[in-house]
Image: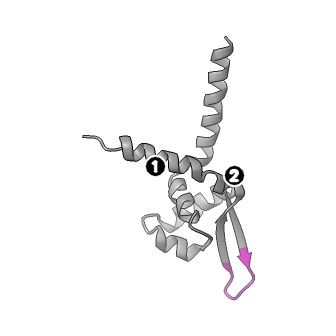
Amino acid sequence: MEIVNEEKQEFTSICSVLQILGAKWAFLVIAELSKGPKRFKQLHRDLAIIKTQSLTDVLRHLEKNGIVLRVVFPSVPISVEYSLTEKGADFQTALKEMDKWAVKWGKTD
């Protein structure tokens, strides 16, 4: 029974991570912000595949879950910069491993 409980706990942890990072486009946003802080318009240009509202939604979701930091600069007009938190930056190791797996196994015939 103990092994089953350990496996259940492991999958529960994975599921909780997927709830945070499973938002559509989350991986792309995290990967882009891993290059450094970006303002919204710059991030939107770099991730042109993502519609404006979807980018806004995923940034809010990641901010709410402590992955992304949103800083508002009191300029005219107001500018907003996004960056990864320590928690978000720490996810880079997992992203790199996922990329290795995708390169090895991602192609299907």
Which residue corresponds to the image point at 59% horizontal and 60% vertical from the top-left?
57
Quick one: which residue is furthest to the top in this view?
1
Q: How is the image coloured?
A: one colour
Quadrant where the image shows the C terminus: top left
Seen from the viewer's position, the closer of residues 54 and 2 is 2
Quick one: which residue is furthest to the bottom in this view?
76
Which residue corresponds to the image point at 54% horizontal and 76% vertical from the top-left?
42
- Label located before the other in sequence (2 or 1): 2
Q: Residues within 10 Å of mark 1 (few under 14, many from 20)?
A: few
Helix, strand or loop at label 1? It is helix
Residue 58 vs residue 107: left or right? right
Seen from the viewer's position, the closer of residues 100 and 1 is 100
Q: Quick check: 100 above or below 11?
A: below
Helix, strand or loop at label 2? It is loop
The amino acid type, in three-letter code, at marker 2 is Asn
The image shows residue 64 at horizontal and vertical percentages of: 70, 55
The residue to which callout 1 is attached is: 99
Assess whether residue 75 is covered by the magenta stretch. Answer: yes
The image shows residue 12 at horizontal and vertical percentages of: 64, 31
Q: Identify the magenta region.
A: 72-79
Quick one: which residue is furthest to the left in this view?
109
For residue 55, which quarter of the picture? bottom right
Q: Which mark is residue 65?
A: 2
